[in-house]
Structure formats: structure tokens, C-alpha cells
Image: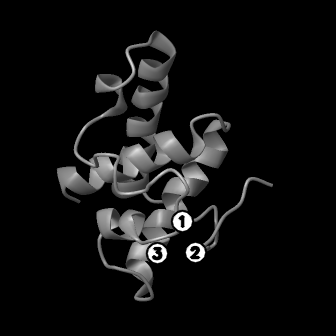
Amino acid sequence: MSSAAMLCLALAVFYESRGEPLRGQQAVAEVIVNRAESGKYPKDICSVIKQQGQFSWYNGNISLSKPPVFIYKNAQVNESWEQAKDVAHQALREPTNHTKGALFFNST
């Protein structure tokens, strides 16, 4: 996977689920990867995230090329960002199937 895909996925995990337990963050990453591999969505991670109306945090104004630590200078944000990167790395390098191929998720 490209470094762009890794960054986009980490940003999605960060903005979509940083307040969730680790398992929830992993599920978000897995669903995004599932979409990219499904043939029903764009084939690359960044394009899946950019799809209109798919993610409430993405409105086209958030850079998919800059980590949030440049925006927020805060130790808790830095920890959340490091965890989001770890989750993205795992989802792309060592995929699991905890979501059983799910293409959607919600907070419940």
C-alpha cells in the first residue's frame, strides 16, 4: 500500500473514531479497506474517503496530506494520532476480518 493510502486511512480513523475503543477504530479502518476492495466503491483508500456524504468529518476542506498534529498542538491529539497510524498500518499490512466484509458501520 502506498504512503498516501496509509495517511488517508490514518486520518479517517483519527477523525471518525478517535474517541472509540481500539476495536472500534480497527473496525472503521477495516470497513474502509473492505470498500476499496469490494468493486462497489473507488479502488483506492483516499477516493473511498473523499466520496461525498460518506464521512461526516470529510467535507473537502480537510487536507488528506497533513497529519492533524499540525492543526492541533496537544499531547492527547498526538497520542490519538499515533494510535490512528498504528491502526491504519495494521489494517493495510496485516488485515483481519473482524467485520466479516462489512461495507458500513455505525457507533452501536
Secondary structure found at label 2: loop
- Mark 2 and mark 3 in contact? Answer it, CB < 8 Å: yes
Quarter that holds the N terminus: bottom left
Position in image of residue 13 (x %, y %): 49, 46
Disc 1 crowd rating (10 Å Cα; few below 14, some 14-19, many 20+) is many
The three-letter code of the residue at mark 1 reads Val
Please tell me which of labels 2 and 1 falls first in the chain: 1
Q: Name the residue under label 2.
A: 103
Most extreme residue toward the right, as rendered? 108
Q: Which residue corresponds to the image point at 39% horizontal and 44% vertical from the top-left? A: 11
Q: Mark 1 points at which residue?
A: 31
Secondary structure found at label 3: helix
Q: Mark 3 points at which residue?
A: 35
- Mark 2 and mark 1 in contact? Answer it, CB < 8 Å: yes
Side of 20 where 48 appears, left or right: left
Secondary structure found at label 1: helix
Position in image of residue 47 (x %, y %): 32, 69
Q: Which residue corresponds to the image point at 48% horizontal and 72% vertical from the top-left? A: 34
- Mark 1 and mark 3 in contact? Answer it, CB < 8 Å: yes
Which quarter of the picture shows residue 86?
A: top left
Name the foreground residue: 41 vs 58.
58
